[in-house]
Image (cartoon, rainbow, N blue to C red):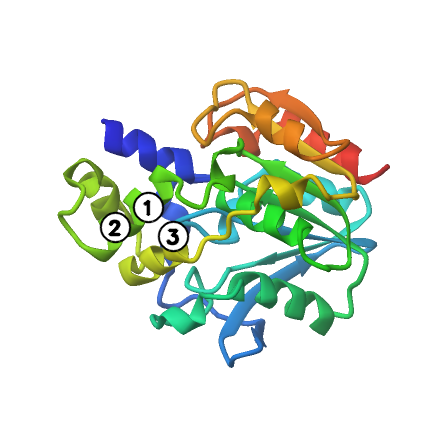
Amino acid sequence: MKALLLLISLLPGSLWAQAVSESSSREPLFTSFDGTKIHYDTIGRGRPVVLLHGFISNSTSWKRAAVRQALADAGFKVVTLDLRGNGLSDRPHAAEAYKDDAELRDVLALMKHLGLTNYDVVGYSRGAILAAELLTLKAPIRRVVLGGVGADFTDPNWERRRNFQEAFAKPGTHPDLRPAVENAKRAGADTIVMARLQEFQPAASPTKLKKVKIPVLIVNGDQDRDNGDPQKLVDMIPGSKLIVVPGDHGGAMRTPEFANAVVQFLTR
């Protein structure tokens, strides 16, 4: 039970989101900086916003959540993508494919490819961890929403990250996480990739986050403390705000309250 709860705490939705049908079309595809092909999709017209999904998931999780359509209806051009190693995007195994913020370089390159600048970013769970790292880079972003995270990810030695990396890289090293790994396999996740994603997951430091100058909203479920205390993260980012919505870690992002909070923040 503990293992399953740990897995759920890292997911923005249920595990089915990673499974990809053999008949699914991979188009449209974008060729990133190192030749990795990234699947993406867009809906709506207007101010650009990119949505970043969580661990053992893909952009389908956003398509099952109210916030994607709500943003399109509110006058946004919404970009979703399968981060490298997930969904319909390429799944390289080499460490070089994931180090040096490769996932974020994909996001920046894709938005440039689409001709989009001064855009907003919404991340949930691991996607929020990536979005937090974007805050510390010289990225052309206007506003950022971090969903389903507290401050724990800012520790480069975060125990949960290390345990999951080891569990996926070396089967049997964490018997309590074996059910989580097996569930990920059944869902179609590539275990080598999952280990790489944890190995090279960024950890935006409190020192860097204190230098952030753009508006940041943190949205967390009222039953979600799986990734730490969101208020501690608010305290690290100057001027950031916290909104609590109904739900646990797996369900909060799918609620209308989450969608409303994101839309209202980004339409300002």
Q: Residue pushed farthest right?
A: 268
Find disc 2 in the rendering and name its residue: 166
Secondary structure found at label 1 = helix
Q: Is residue 186 visible?
A: no
Q: Earlier in the sequence, mark 3 or mark 1?
A: 1
Q: CA distance from mark 1 to mark 2?
A: 6 Å
- Residue 58: % across, % down: 47, 53
Q: Earlier in the sequence, mark 2 or mark 3?
A: 2
Secondary structure found at label 3 = helix
The residue shown at (54%, 45%) is 129
Q: Amino acid at mark 1?
A: Arg
Q: In the shown orientation, is residue 194 left or right of residue 46?
A: left
Q: In the shown orientation, is residue 102 left or right of residue 134?
A: left
Find disc 3 in the rendering and name its residue: 198
Secondary structure found at label 2 = helix
Number of the label disc, if any, that sits on residue 162: 1
